[in-house]
Amino acid sequence: MPFSKLKTFQSFFSAPSICLTFNKVKACEVGASDCIHKPFHPAEVIAQIKNQIRIRQQFLQIQAQQAMIGRQQQKMTTVELNLAESVRLKNRFAHVFTCCYAVASC
């Protein structure tokens, strides 16, 4: 695939791209995830593919963890709001009971 089409191709997919090229600089400039210089050895290509798969899996795992943290933060905010409301109501009713006790004592 020509370098000029790499960015267009990547806009449709979130998969990493590894360029087999003589021009590593140009490949990196257009957004290749990694480059392998020609001539290449097949074992190098396989190693780079495995590395990109591992990086992608770690990225997805981090995204999932961030989403979970966001959900936990929302739950904590709800708990904090409920606790604050409970304290407010406790203080309000404590005042009401104190007033009732004072009136009853008279």
Image (cartoon, helix red, strand yellow):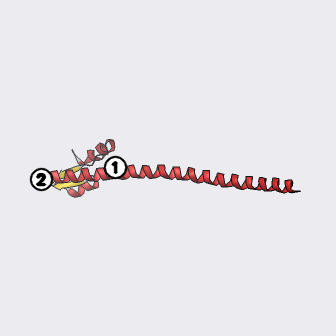
Q: Please name whichever residue, 30 or 43, is drawn nearer the observer in this view of the structure.
A: 43
Q: Please name whichever residue, 9 or 47, is drawn nearer the observer in this view of the structure.
A: 47
Mark 1 or 2, closer to the camera = 1
Crowding at mark 1 (Cα within 10 Å: few <14, some 14-19, many 20+)? few
Give the percent coordinates (x, y) of residue 88: 69, 54
Crowding at mark 2 (Cα within 10 Å: few <14, some 14-19, many 20+)? few
- Can you tell which quarter of the image residue 14 is in? top left
Q: Amino acid at mark 1?
A: Leu
From the viewer's perspective, is 13 left or right of 77? left
Residue underneath mark 2 = 43
From the viewer's perspective, is 20 left or right of 28? left
Query: Tag 2, which secondary structure?
Result: helix
- Can you tell which quarter of the image residue 84 is in? bottom right
Q: Quadrant of the N terminus?
A: top left
From the viewer's perspective, is 105 left or right of 2? right
Height in image: 38 above or below 13? Answer: below
Q: At 70% from the left edge and 52% from the top edge, which residue is drawn?
A: 89
Residue underneath mark 1 = 60
- How many labels were placed on the picture? 2
Furthest-top residue in view?
Answer: 12
From the viewer's perspective, is 101 left or right of 82? right
C-alpha span from label 1 to label 2: 26 Å
Q: At 61% from the left edge and 53% from the top edge, which residue is drawn?
A: 83
Q: Amino acid at mark 2?
A: Ala
Give the percent coordinates (x, y) of residue 4: 26, 47
Give the percent coordinates (x, y) of residue 74: 52, 50
Query: Tag 1, which secondary structure?
Result: helix
Q: At 21% from the left edge and 57% from the top edge, which residue is drawn?
A: 24
